[in-house]
Image (cartoon, rainbow, N blue to C red):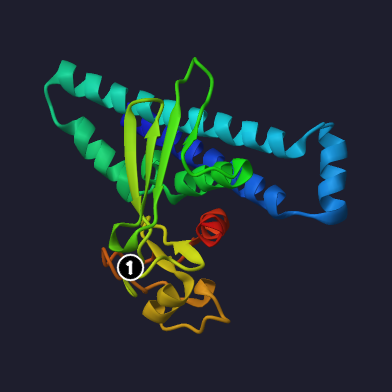
């Protein structure tokens, strides 16, 4: 059972990250490439279509994550054991729990940037509202999400190293978000080289997990959102 759930969670996480990357790339694409994409997709309003795709992807990711959690909760209730909780911890450690992923934050920032609003987004009646609160007041700077009317997530926007609002944010594979310059400094690499030159033994400055620089997430949409605000 757990092997099947791990495979399903892995596929969902891979699909979500791939789709977010594609949406972000399209959002930042301009000129002829953007025009050709719009013509190929036959979109009358490409920005509106991008937003719809982003909202649907949020719904897909959250609904699947909630379903997985309910399966684990039901398993523990029936079998009276803690295997479900242990499995959930392993998913988070492997970065397969999409609700703990920086890709979800990047996706939400993508949607906010498209509609130019920092208060709320409303999805369809089937899935319920998506509420967003962006607070950029000093040490309390945080992005709060209430997804599908029940799942509440808080993402700190303060870099743990410089203790300032993240600038050119990057997330390591453990999920912690830093300024690009701060992450490079912690990994002893030059900013112009980038995080890809970090040693595989480099550890996260927060959780001290090693190997977290292998697949860093460049959070372009979150960076754009913070610049605009």
Residue 199 appears in the rendering:
no
Where residue 6 appears, as percent x and y from the top left, is 38, 36
Count of marks, rendered view: 1
Nearer to the camera, 111 or 14: 111
Image quarter hosting the N terminus: top left
Nearer to the camera, 77 or 19: 19
Horizontally, residue 123 falls left or right of residue 51, namely left
Nearer to the camera, 29 or 96: 29
Nearer to the camera, 22 or 161: 161
Q: Residue at x 61, y 40 (%)?
A: 115
Asked which quadrant contains residue 82, the reply is top left
> Compared with residue 99, is residue 148 higher up or lower down, i.e. above or below?
above
Where residue 78 appears, as percent x and y from the top left, is 17, 16
Residue 169 appears in the rendering:
yes
Q: Which residue is mark 1?
A: 204
Q: Residue at x 51, y 67 (%)?
A: 168
Horizontally, residue 150 falls left or right of residue 54, namely left
> Compared with residue 86, is residue 201 higher up or lower down, i.e. above or below?
below
> Compared with residue 20, is residue 63 higher up or lower down, i.e. above or below?
above
Q: Residues within 10 Å of mark 1 (few under 14, many from 20)?
A: many
């Amino acid at each position: 059972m757990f092997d099947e759930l791990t495979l399903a969670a892995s596929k969902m996480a891979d699909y979500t990250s791939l789709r977010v990357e594609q949406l972000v790339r399209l959002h930042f694409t301009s000129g002829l490439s953007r025009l050709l994409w719009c013509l190929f997709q036959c979109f009358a309003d490409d920005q509106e279509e991008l937003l719809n795709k982003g909202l649907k992807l949020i719904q897909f990711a959250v609904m699947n994550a909630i379903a997985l959690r309910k399966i684990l909760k039901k398993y523990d209730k029936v079998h009276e054991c803690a295997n479900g909780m242990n499995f959930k911890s392993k998913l988070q450690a492997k970065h397969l729990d999409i609700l703990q992923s920086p890709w979800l934050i990047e996706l939400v920032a993508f949607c906010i940037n498209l509609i130019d609003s920092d208060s709320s987004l409303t999805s369809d009646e089937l899935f319920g509202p998506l509420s967003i609160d962006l607070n950029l007041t000093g040490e309390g700077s945080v992005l709060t999400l209430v997804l599908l009317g029940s799942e509440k997530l808080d993402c700190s926007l303060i870099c743990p190293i410089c203790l300032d609002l993240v600038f050119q944010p990057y997330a390591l594979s453990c999920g912690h978000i830093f300024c690009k310059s701060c992450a490079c400094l912690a990994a002893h690499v030059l900013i112009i080289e980038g995080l890809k030159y970090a040693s595989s033994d480099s550890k996260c400055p927060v959780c001290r997990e090693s190997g977290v620089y292998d697949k860093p997430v460049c959070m372009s949409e979150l960076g754009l959102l913070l610049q605009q605000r």
